[in-house]
Amino acid sequence: MKKLLLTLALGSPFALLAQTNLYALIDKQADAIEQQVITWRRDIHQNPELSNREFKTAEKVAAHLKSLGIAVETKVALTGVVGILKGDKPGPVVALRADMDALPVVERVNLPFASKVKSDYRGEQVGVMHACGHDTHVAMLMGAASVLAGMKKDLPGTVIFLFQPAEEGAPPGEKGGAKLMVEEGVLKRHGVSAVFGIHIGSANEVGTVRLKAGSLQASADRFVIKVKGKQTHGSMPWGGIDPVTVSAQIILGLQNIVSRQVDISEAPVVISVGKISGGVRNNIIPEEVELEGTIRCLDPKMQDEVHARMKTTAVNIAESAGATAEVEVVKHVPITANNPALTQRMGPTLKRVAGEDNVIVTKPIMGAEDFSFFANEVPGVFMFLGGMKKGQDPKTAPPHHTPDFYIDESGLKLGVRLHCNMALDYLREGALK
């Protein structure tokens, strides 16, 4: 097991004593609020809302922050909530982030607080479920706000609580998520100098924290390839140009980019075709086929190279058969990269809070996370918190975005403690130079 090898800068004995007392206070308050955090989580889980539709969740968050005496901004990036907790001592500004939206998934877990909610998604009635753990993220940050608000007189700076909508992506035709919050100036407006985020992990054991410096999660880009041929009768393929077989060759060609054209020993690459559309009848070769998919990269230069190679591959394969191919690639979510200096600085905090053996350097993950928009503006650190019961085989843990997704709630208190300790230590040590 790899561990973060980091050093802790020591202050004066009096400063360390005061700091130790604050750490003990955080632990005491986290113990006291643990059951309330679980109650919040279950309520949010039972009442999930889709991206840009987190109206009730936002109301609950805003009401809680106001009850703590925290200044509140609502309707940020449509449904987001921002809390501003100014400590009584001067210092920098740090942000803590939680995402609020659920997914169009029908829950299959037998829980007393399982979701029965249905909602409209792209014109269809769908089940709605917190199948990625955002309910736990909201509850943990609400708990951290409670603890930190009670320490206002000891905070040397300001804590910004970012309750973000639409992490899973805004509906078609809408803006949303972290990108819109950044565009609206939420970080600049409050002078944020660092941001921290925690994501629960269904296959990570409770009590563990996984992260790494540098690229942690992949970029997520969407592509559409329109292959145009010439329609003909299915019994006479020579009478036309078959875009179906050309599309098949293009799909294989895209995989050759990954396996033969880029150095994946430097950084992994994934190209996946997730949707193929074309044709109306079994005995008619259609005029057009459309391919739609995703591209995942962990290196920005390789990302641009892959995009260029995809266009070359699709266009040339199509031309070799007398067809044409139009390729559109849209950059969607950037690479999530942890700031190396900030990751190094937070290492002692994480080890103190979670235990040295429980802070693990993880491998990069090909899933994407729009926390990247925050971390591209100011130094950021994103990590994964264990949500799988102790001793369970990770291979048996239901993945995120599935109907059987499950989280062991005993890990939520650690999330509250991490939020509070990271904020406190960052404020105490000052902004990165």
Image (cartoon, rainbow, N blue to C red):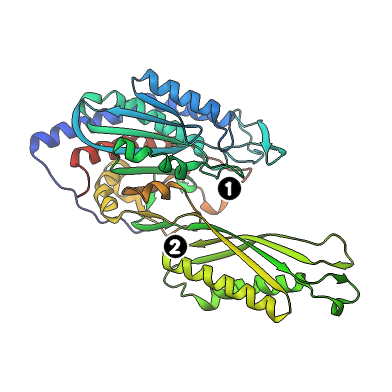
Q: Nearer the viewer, residue 382 or 165?
A: 165
Provide residue 131's location: percent of width, then percent of height: 57, 41
Q: In which quadrant of the rendered view does residue 361 lie?
A: bottom left
Judging from the image, what secondary structure is the residue with disc 2 in? loop
- The amino acid sitting under disc 2 is Leu
Are the two marked residues, 1 and 2, in contact with CB atoms closer than 8 angstroms? no
Query: In the drawing, does residue 55 fall left or right of residue 204?
Result: right
Dot 1 crowding, Cα within 10 Å, few <14, some 14–19, many 20+: some
Query: In the image, which disc is placed on residue 398?
Result: 1
Q: Nearer the viewer, residue 210 or 252?
A: 252
Numbered disc total: 2
Q: Nearer the viewer, residue 178 or 418?
A: 178
- The amino acid sitting under disc 1 is Pro
Alpha-carbon span between mark 1 and mark 2: 25 Å
Against 25, is 428 above or below?
below
Answer with mark 1 or mark 2, whichever residue precedes in sequence. 2
**Residue pointed to by mark 2:** 298
In the image, what residue occupies the spot 37% across and 49% down?
A: 375
Q: Nearer the viewer, residue 53 or 107?
A: 53
Judging from the image, what secondary structure is the residue with disc 1 in? loop
Front of the two marks 1 and 2? 2
Provide residue 220's location: percent of width, then percent of height: 52, 56
Provide residue 123's location: percent of width, then percent of height: 71, 39
Query: In the drawing, does residue 167 fall left or right of residue 241?
Result: left
